Amino acid sequence: MRSDIEIAQACRMRPITEVAARAGIDERYLEQYGRYKAKVDPALLNAGAERAGKLILVTAITPTAAGEGKTTTAIGLADALCRIGKNAVLAMREPSLGPVFGLKGGAAGGGYAQVVPMEDINLHFTGDIHAIGAAHNLLAAMVDNHIYQGNALNIDPQRVTWRRCVDMNDRQLRNIRDGLGKRTDGVPRDDGFDITVATETMAVFCLADSLADLKARLARMIVGYTYDGAPVTAAQLNAVGAMAALLKDAIKPNLVQTLEGTPAFVHGGPFANIAHGCNSVTATRMAMHLGDYAVTEAGFGADLGAEKFLDIKCRAAGLKPDAAVVVATVRALKMHGGADKAALDEENLAALAAGLPNLMRHVNVLKDTYGLNCVVAINRFPSDTAAELRLVEEECRAAGVNAKLCEVWAKGGAGGEELAREVVRLCAAPEDFRFAYALTDTIEEKLAAVTRRVYGGRGVIFTDEARAQLEALNAQGFGKLPVCVAKTQYSFSDDKTKLGAPEDFDITVRELRVSAGAGFIVALTGDILTMPGLPKRPAAEGIDVDGAGRITGLF
């Protein structure tokens, strides 16, 4: 079979005007970026009668090196819904260059379930992430310039919390000392870089529902503290207008298409293990406005992306999912059950049975904690045996959910029709959506609720530093904000080696930060980092472009 990029390059893409017309977008709201990409003016949401299609959340089991195919399934599901006669629109995150050139690769789907133009989406696309990085670093420059120019706001250089960013995995930049050299080169201080998709600027960008809301959120962002301990905001530095100017075009959702021509919005891309893991509110609302069914995905498993989608994004935007899909593979479940990666092609019912509790916990989180109707999508691999597939289906049936084979990677939308019909059925069924915690709970109570009700853990331990930060956040009036837990994606716990469905564990919070503009408290757990590093052999080593400009090695 051809590689993902070969499949994408062989696709005869429709002009983006044709895709827009299919979605019901009038040309006056369309800003074309070449023949196959466009931005859509958010004013479209206020044009004509207000519409709200069914919202479908695609999440997954705990990821493994075997792969799960969550994004591929989301794309294929949207195509499948269209194939069975439904009006579906897709809303996804933009890929970060960090994973593209690092370990994970791109995020445009795979096989015959992709969004195109795949190369553009995985690389610079329409420049949104670059704009976010520029706005973020402008604020960083204005902080240090303010200190250098006399420091009228009395900012303590040792309590500047606004780090710089770059959209690349670069461990060398995690911790730096800047302002070195002559007196005119700045005030020396300890500093560091985060990856752009983990920044508060990205979070604010994705949660804002308008340019006015974006500016209000930017204004509230805290960049550091005075010598007296008072927070200093972007508004006090007069940075908001310039930052918004850099973001004014980026905030418009990007319209592309699937291989089968289904309209797809790809916009915003925070990581789910270190940020809130969802595409922009505006893109989701636009998909719901234009489609009878809006398919969206959140990063990693239900313990990370789905939890943040539900407890942060849905709460902030007033959204309510109508159904959820949990993507699983037999191979990944066998790894959770202790099977070696090299032996995953062999039938192993014992390992599969031992790994199934991981799937069941994700299902129970969605059903019992959040009150959602859900279906399990078994992303089928050729090595899956009839006995293995039957075991997964039986276990799901016993838990009160249906499992549907999904073959969209190999067959496109045709391989997801059964899944699509189940999703349509679930969307018509009653549900009782609720959050994992109340905003009136304390920060401690919220973190404890997520640990017990989502992760399946016992409780939360705070380091002395985190305990002091907790007291400060409460004193500053931030105690009623939702929480955004930065945690390894490879386990329900904060220890990436604990596969399956671990029990009787505590989550250790080592640092608490307020993202006042985004409107949540960030809790860093375990050894999670806001600036990833490259692997021993980065994906970048296999990427090339020929004399005709044709890219190879991108996946």
Image (cartoon, rainbow, N blue to C red):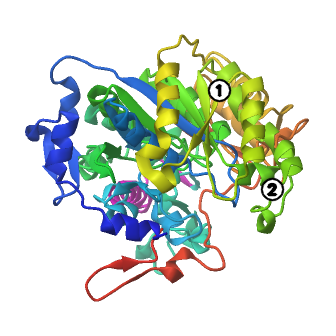
Check if residue 71 falls in the magenta segment: no
- Image: 108 above or below 319: below
Q: Secondary structure at mark 2?
A: loop
Q: Which of disc 2 and disc 1 is earlier in sequence?
A: 2
What are the residue bounds of the magenta stretch?
130-157
Q: Magenta span: helix, strand or loop, mainly?
A: helix
Observer able to see residue 400 = yes
Residue 514 lies in what quarter of the image?
A: top right
Q: Depth check: 459 or 298 in front?
A: 298
> What residue is rendered at 77% in x and 24% in y?
398
Q: Residue furthest left?
A: 28
Q: Nearer the viewer, mark 1 or mark 2?
A: 2
Residue 100, position as x, y percentages in the image = 49, 67
Q: Is residue 153 visible?
A: no
Residue 278's x, y, as percent? Answer: 48, 41
Q: Residues within 10 Å of mark 2 (few under 14, many from 20)?
A: some
Q: Residue shown at 58%/12% (left/top)?
A: 432
Q: Amino acid at mark 2?
A: Glu
Membership of 142 in magenta stretch: yes
CA–CA distance in space, label 1 to label 2: 29 Å
The image quadrant of residue 387 is top right
Q: Residue at horizontal 32%, vertical 64%? A: 120
- What residue is shown with label 1? 366
Q: Give me the residue at 36% from left, 58% from top.
A: 138
Task: Please tell me how crowded label 1 is: few (under 14), some (14-19), or many (20+) other residues with Cα within 10 Å.
Answer: many
Using residue 337 as the reference point, say whether residue 119 is left or right of it. left
Residue tagged by mark 2?
Answer: 347
From this view, report whether residue 16 is shown above or below residue 376: below
Instruction: Name the residue type under label 1.
Output: Leu
